[in-house]
Image (cartoon, helix red, strand yellow):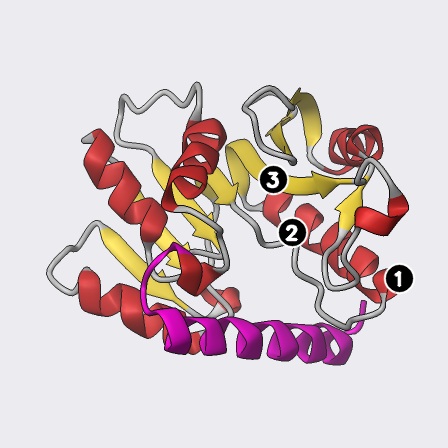
Amino acid sequence: MTPVAERSIESVVAGYYCRALSRHGPTHRGVDWSTQESQELRFATLLDGIDWSGRPTLLDFGCGYGALAEHLDDLGVDCDYVGYDIAPAMIDAARRSYRDRDDRRFTADAISLQRADFVVASGVFNVKLDIPRSSWTTYVGATIAQLGSLTRRRLSFNMLPAASAPELEREDLYYSNPGAVVRYCRATVGGPVELREDYGLWEFTVLASPAGA
């Protein structure tokens, strides 16, 4: 994918989420989740099994207004957290909430991102809007590869599987084959991959580790 095409996609998506935040504020609705409970269940699944000893680093890719940072605070875990989002308004909201915390940093600058022990991406692949499916598929593949290169120990992300019937699928959402995603992660991230489909939501979570992690 060319840088111009990538910027065009991200501009459309950033605009969508900036409008959602403007309408609903820093809440689950502001990042387009139906309930706070489902948002927190996703977080729990993405973080499941992480060893928090030794103060690991964590990159929250698509951090929104900082909901995962709040979830980590509720868990009481100790880590160095960096949140990244393509929507500047989201970063502004997150920074207002965490302006007094040195261990919670937020940025909209993708070039500044550094490798982290754990990389988490919740919901970043689901909403394609009116972007052609072929273009979005290329974008998703490139993003997974990018996140894999930023991961020292484990990459976690979630996606939507195909609906039970084609007529139930929405044109603005992106659906993937879980098996194909797992195979792609094995090829690009390089290590073992775990597929989670057991947490009660119509989606799946992939946990992928680099070789030797």
The image quarter containing residue 108 is bottom left
Q: Nearer the viewer, residue 88 or 39?
A: 39
> Which residues, given as a range, are shown in magenta?
1-28
The kind of secondary structure element at disc 3 is strand
Q: CA distance from mark 3 to mark 2?
A: 16 Å
Please give left or right for residue 157 compared with residue 112 in the image: right
Amino acid tagged 2: Gln
Distance of mark 1 from mark 2, alpha carbons?
A: 19 Å
Q: Is residue 76 above or below residue 51?
A: below
Residue 134: image tag = 1
Q: Secondary structure at mark 1?
A: helix
At horizontal 40% and vertical 76% (from top left) the residue drawn is 23
Q: Position of residue 81 (x, y in %)?
A: 31, 47
The residue wearing badge 3 is 158
Between 213 and 120, the one lying in front of the other is 120
| Residue 77 percent coordinates (x, y) | 23, 30
- The earlier-in-sequence mark between 3 and 1 is 1
Residue drawn 52% across the image and 46% down it = 122
Quarter of the rendering occupied by the C terminus: top right
Mark 3 or mark 2, earlier in chain? 2
Crowd around label 3: few <14 · some 14–19 · many ≥20 (10 Å): many
The quarter of the rendered structure image containing the N terminus is bottom right
| 3D distance between C-alphas at marks 3 and 1 | 19 Å
Task: Rate crowding at label 1 as few (under 14), some (14 to 19) or many (20 or more) other CA atoms within 10 Å.
Answer: few
* Magenta residue check for 50: no
Q: Position of residue 140 (x, y in %)?
A: 73, 54
Give the labeled residue for mark 2.
Answer: 146
